[in-house]
Amino acid sequence: MPVGPLTHARSVVIAVAVHIVVFALFVVGYQMKPKPSQALVDPVNIVQAEVIDGAAIELEKRKKREQKEERERKKREEELRKKREKEEQARREAEARKKAEEKRL
């Protein structure tokens, strides 16, 4: 094949055309990527988590248990106080009856 100015011009045109086609394919390929829709980009509720130490849990359980025991102790003391008051009242009434009986005699 003879090499001449026309052959070189044809080669340049073919090379430019190939480059344009490749560039066009890149642009079309880039534009074909799906754009993220709003549904995919919606903010997600993030869980606010915190690390809890096992010792802290045990401490809390112990505090609750101690509070329960304290309430039960106070309840028992109150019941005992009421029982003593009733006994004291009964003793005073018996004493008053005894005095009244002695006075009557």
Image (cartoon, rainbow, N blue to C red):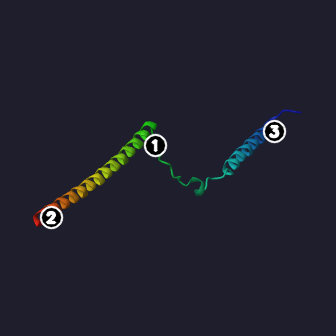
Q: Is residue 79 left or right of residue 101?
A: right
Q: Dot 2 corresponds to which residue? A: 101
Above/below status of 95 relative to 29: below
Q: Residue at x 19, y 61 (%)?
A: 93
Q: Is residue 26 left or right of residue 98?
A: right
Q: CA distance from mark 3 to mark 1?
A: 77 Å
The residue closer to the viewer here, 98 or 52, is: 98
Looking at the rendered structure, the kind of residue marked 3 is: Leu
Q: Which mark is residue 63?
A: none
Q: Residue at x 60, y 54 (%)?
A: 40
Q: Quadrant of residue 65?
A: top left
Q: CA distance from mark 2 to mark 3?
A: 152 Å
Q: Which mark is residue 6?
A: 3
Q: Which mark is residue 50?
A: 1
Q: Earlier in the sequence, mark 3 or mark 1?
A: 3
Q: Residues within 10 Å of mark 2 (few under 14, many from 20)?
A: few
* Residue 89: x %, y % from top left: 21, 59
Looking at the rendered structure, the kind of residue marked 2 is: Glu
Q: Is residue 39 left or right of residue 95?
A: right
* Residue 19: x %, y % from top left: 73, 41
Of badges 2 and 3, the one in the foreground is: 2
Q: Residues within 10 Å of mark 1 (few under 14, many from 20)?
A: few
Q: Earlier in the sequence, mark 1 or mark 2?
A: 1
Looking at the rendered structure, the kind of residue marked 1 is: Glu
Q: Residues within 10 Å of mark 3 (few under 14, many from 20)?
A: few
Q: Residue at x 40, y 39 (%)?
A: 59
Q: CA distance from mark 1 to mark 2?
A: 76 Å
**Local secondary structure at mark 1:** loop
